[in-house]
Image (cartoon, helix red, strand yellow):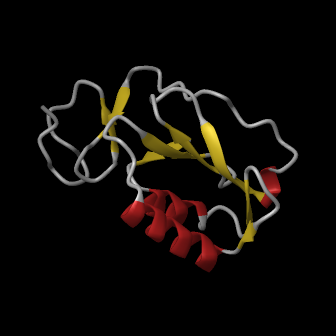
Amino acid sequence: MKQFKSLHEAAEYATSLAGQWSFANSDAAYAPEGLLVLAQTSDAEDPIDEDSVYVVSDGGSIGLCEDEEDIDWLFIADQEKDLALPDTFASGGTRRICNQCGQEVEADAHFCDQCGASLN
């Protein structure tokens, strides 16, 4: 699973993996364009906390980790409807997220490999 600091970034990645999603707690369905608009609106109106991340499963489902461990699945990719998605995110302690660009970096890194931001 990949991690992202905004729902829009997570949705952009998810659209490269799947073509249709359902909202986790309803029958509302989203095509890529609708998911991207919803994600952008959500980020503008209700950004996540500094300690939270969005995760995208290998099949394109999107979840929110408010404590960087437990996953609250928000959008389920149609291709993963009948699969059991994980309840927790285990990063293994060897990686973390750059606060500047959202890229995963090694836990002991001092600078982000993607954007060069200081991680200290």
Q: Position of residue 110 (x, y in %)?
A: 14, 32
Q: Position of residue 55 (x, y in %)?
A: 53, 44
Q: Position of residue 78 (x, y in %)?
A: 80, 59
Q: Position of residue 89 (x, y in %)?
A: 55, 29
Q: In the rendered view, would you say 42 is above or below 86?
A: below
Q: Nearer the viewer, residue 69 or 106?
A: 69
Q: Residue furthest right?
A: 82
Residue at left offset 60%, top offset 67%? 15
Q: Residue furthest bottom?
A: 33
Q: How many numbered marks, from 0 up? A: 0
Q: In the rendered view, would you say 112 is above or below 75?
A: above
Residue at left offset 15%, top offset 50%? 116
Q: In the rendered view, would you say 70 is above or below 4?
A: above
Q: Residue furthest top?
A: 93
Asked whether, in this view, residue 85 is left or right of residue 27, the answer is left
Asked whether, in this view, residue 42 is left or right of residue 86, the answer is left
Quarter of the N terminus within the rendering: top right
Quadrant in the picture for residue 50: top left
Asked whether, in this view, residue 103 is left or right of residue 114, the answer is right
Q: In the rendered view, would you say 77 is above or below 71?
A: below
Quarter of the C terminus within the rendering: top left
